[in-house]
Amino acid sequence: MTTTIQSNPSILAATIKHWQTADQGIPTTDLSKARYLTPAEITALLLASRTDPKIGHAALLTCALLSGISVRDLALARWHDLDLDGHSIDSYVIASGGYERRLLNPPTHALLHRWQFEARAFFDLLFGEDAEQIDLDDVQATLNRIARVAGIPALSFDDLQRSHEYIALGVALCDAS
């Protein structure tokens, strides 16, 4: 079963409360296309990604899910953008055309710390297998393969980002209660 923000009134209420106090307007999206993974689906996806042969792509997708940083932005990340001591990454944001410092939550920090020691640090790109730019069509194919192994329908990059937001909001609600 796919969970949407519409089917969870407490999450919808918290979201609206947040944006009522923020300077920006309430975000809108085409809800007919919006998809949020359930915690069970996220667990299945994370487990399936561990066995994928494209380990760079799997690590990129896992990092996107755990951090909420878009796959497109992470695909451009380089090792010198990562500050593990400061728990942050300076990532290029395609939408704004500039760099933004983003703090890493503990699971993302642990993933990137481990990734650094899996003999990947000698490449320029954080998740690249070589010096070439990461092919996002190949990454999407990897995401589709991992989803199939996990037994869930095909996903988009945006589904990963929305699912991170959904889980982060759920954690915040649990912490508040």
Image: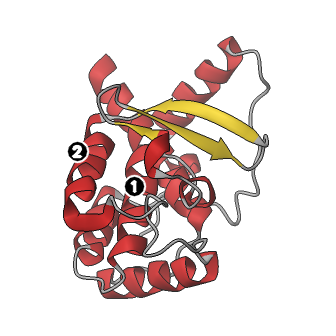
Please give left or right for residue 137 compared with residue 84 in the image. right
Q: Quadrant of the N terminus?
A: bottom left
| Residue situated in front as seen by the camera: 115 or 148 | 115
Could you give the CA–CA distance between mark 2 and mark 1, rounded to whole angstroms? 10 Å
Label 2 SS:
helix
Q: Position of residue 147 (x, y in %)?
A: 40, 80
* Residue placed furthest toward the front: 122
Disc 2 packing (10 Å; few <14; some 14–19; many ≥20): some
Q: Quadrant of the C terminus?
A: top left
Q: Amino acid at mark 2?
A: Ala
Q: Position of residue 89 (x, y in %)?
A: 47, 37
| Residue situated in front as seen by the camera: 94 or 62 | 94
Residue visible at 29% across and 28% down in the picture: 85
**Mark sitting earlier along the chain (2/1):** 1
Residue 117 lies, with reference to residue 21, above or below; the image says below
Please give left or right for residue 102 compared with residue 73 in the image. left
Q: Position of residue 59 (x, y in %)?
A: 35, 65
Residue visible at 50% across and 59% down in the picture: 160
Find out whether the residues at labels 2 and 1 contact each other: C-beta distance under 8 Å: no
Residue visible at 49% across and 41% down in the picture: 81
Label 1 SS:
helix
Q: Which residue is mark 1?
A: 63
Q: Position of residue 23 (x, y in %)?
A: 76, 15
Marker disc for residue 110: 2
